[in-house]
Image: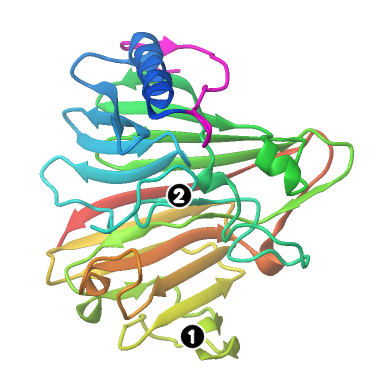
Amino acid sequence: MPTHAMRLHEWGTRMVATAGCSSRSSTLAIDMDLMQLNDNFGVPGVLFFDEHDGLVRANISTPAARATVYLQGAHITAWQPAGQQEVLFLSSKSEFVAGKPIRGGVPISFPWFANRHDGKVGPSHGFARIQDWTLAFAAVAGEDLHLTFTLGPTQLSRDLGFDQFRVAFRLAIGRSLTMQLTVANDAEAPLVFEEALHTYFAVSDVREVTVSGLEATGFVDKADNMTLKPPANAPLTFASATDRVYADTTATCVIHDKPGGRDITVAKTNSNTTVVFNPWKDLADMGRDEWPKMLCVETVNAAGDAITLGSGESHTMEAHISVGSV
């Protein structure tokens, strides 16, 4: 349990302005949130909260790292260990708007990955990344800052058929980054869900990097009409649009960014799917010619690796990211 400068507080669901409220009411609501957050969780010189384009965010600065986390989606958008370049890619054109996903960083996909499989309508990659999460814990331990965000049923989740669950997202932010996503089922019936830490990594040029760790694993090639392809038996290189789903793998992956002078290691626990993605083109919410500067290596449980929880059960998926020089 972290003990240095510990602050542990529980507080209710954040009050946010609805679409019909005046801009003045919205500003007052945000100001109230910021006052509560800074009073209850702020750590001088380490953690403070402010507003960016109407979204509340946590700003982190420790001797080991700097980072930014938005309460919408519990979305970490920046992580830069001391002495290193920024590790996460964030689009210069990403929209910071209530109810819209942020392009870059680490979006949380839950309770489905990509599109729903049951024929029902729902937002791409689920509702978790477009909902406000509650900050429940903040503590400094050594050089690391530990944060826990929680999400429970909301009107949106209930409308989509998910009304008896709890999710916690735990971060340990320092010279490495540890992310734990825990899902609990409060219903009597089983809870079936997919999940992903949809991590966008900043690279010097995706055409010059390789990824090791998946050489022995076959994959579904979503960029080639969902074709099932055999293992490549070689590190992954990039020469065209890439959207690959590697199932039944718990392997650690390493992004070898030789031009950038670093390796980025992605180790994972209780994840049996890895997704690798680059669109090979500018997307609507990406800046001009930004696509070569990003590569997604995602920690996932999806499709045949979806999770089924019995009543009262929980499941924790973890990704641990570290950076080394080459």
Asked if disc 2 and disc 1 are in contact, CB closer than 8 Å, the reply is no
Residue 18 counted in the magenta span: yes
- Coordinates of residue 61 in the picture (x, y in percent): 20, 29
- Pointer 1: residues within 10 angstroms few (<14), some, or many (20+)? some
Residue assigned mark 2: 319
* Quarter in which the N terminus is drawn: top left
Q: Main secondary structure of the magenta part?
A: loop
Residue 220 counted in the magenta span: no
Left or right: 89, with 319 as reference point: left
Bounds of the magenta segment? 1-21
Q: Reading the chain from its start, which is encountered first: label 2 or label 1?
A: 1
The answer for how far apart the CA atoms under marks 2 and 1 are is 25 Å
Q: Label 1 is placed on what type of residue?
A: Ala
Residue assigned mark 1: 223
Point 27% across, 21% down: residue: 48
Considering the numbered disc 2 on the image, is that residue within a helix, a strand or a loop? Answer: strand
